[in-house]
Structure formats: structure tokens, C-alpha cells
Image: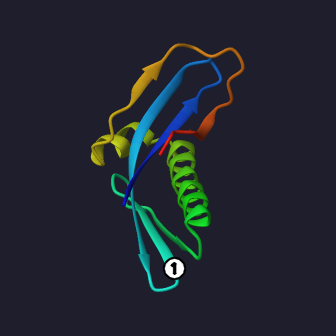
Amino acid sequence: MRDTAVAVRSSADGEQSILVLTLDISRHDDLWVGACLELGTAAYAPTLEELRDELQEAVLLQLNEVERLGFIDQYLQEHSVAVAQLPQARHAQERWGFMAVGV
């Protein structure tokens, strides 16, 4: 099954960016396995809910670390991930997070 995740980045100056990512999820024996197709990040868990949480956490760790290392723009371009800019937010934190999307 395919799922969509929307990652949101808020910077200290209030600027926000979003990434729409595709999650490929399947069940193998007693485990759920998933991967973010754009970034290649993968995870597994015993339940679908736990898998979604684990996969989102892995993607956020990846995005935040690449951001911390200073080459997020190049990294996203190399992985063909489009970044959309949103209007400025009032109370922004400089990091990546996920927003809820209906599935």
C-alpha cells in the first residue's frame, strides 16, 4: 500500500517549507515494513501504527541531521524531492516535523 507523509520545516525566521513524501508499506509475515521512496529510509514494526511512527521518526532524523550538516538543499535536489514554500509562521522552530494527512 502507498501512503503520503507531509514533512514541514519551520525556520527561526518564520519561513516554512513542506515536502510531500511517498511511503511504501507492506506486510511480511508478522511484521509491517515500510520505506520512504524518495529518501530511501526504511523501518519495520509489528503493527501498522508503530511502523508509521517508526518510519516518520527515521525520516525526521534523516532530514534534521542533513539540515544540521548544512547540505539539505543539495540532498533534496539529488533525491528529486520538491520543496514548497509556505507563508511565514509566527512561532517557528528550526527543525523538521510531520503534519497529519488523511489516509
Tell me the quarter of the picture where residue 56 sits. bottom right
Query: Foreground: 84 or 5?
Result: 5
How many neighbours does mark 1 have within 10 angstroms: few (below 14), some (14-19), or many (20 or more)?
some
> Is residue 14 left or right of 69 when viewed as pictured?
right
Q: Is residue 65 above or below residue 91?
A: below
Say if 50 sits above or below 86 in the image: below
Residue type at mark 1?
Answer: Leu
Q: Position of residue 48 (x, y in %)?
A: 55, 66
Furthest residue toward bottom: 29
Question: Residue furthest toward the front?
Answer: 103
Residue located 68% across and 24% down the image: 92
Q: Nearer the viewer, residue 82 or 48?
A: 48
In this rendering, the answer to whether 10 lies above or below 45 is: above
The N terminus sits in image quarter: bottom left
| Quarter where residue 99 is shown | top right
Location of residue 24 in the rendering, given as x and y in whole percent from the top left corner: 37, 60
Q: Residue at x 60, y 26 (%)?
A: 11
Give the side of residue 3 with respect to residue 80, left or right: right
Q: In terms of depth relative to the viewer, which is nearer, 102 or 70?
A: 102
| Residue 8 picture location, percent across and down | 54, 34
Query: Number of numbered discs present?
Result: 1
| Colour theme | rainbow
Image side of residue 61 versus residue 78, left or right: right
**Residue located at (33% from left, 34% from top):** 82
Q: Residue 27 occupies which quadrant of the picture?
A: bottom left
The residue at which mark 1 appears reads as 31
Farthest residue, direction right: 91
Task: Determine whether the residue tagged by mark 1 lies in a helix, strand or loop.
Answer: strand
Figure check: 28 above or below 51: below
Residue drawn at the location 55% of the way across and 59% of the way down = 52
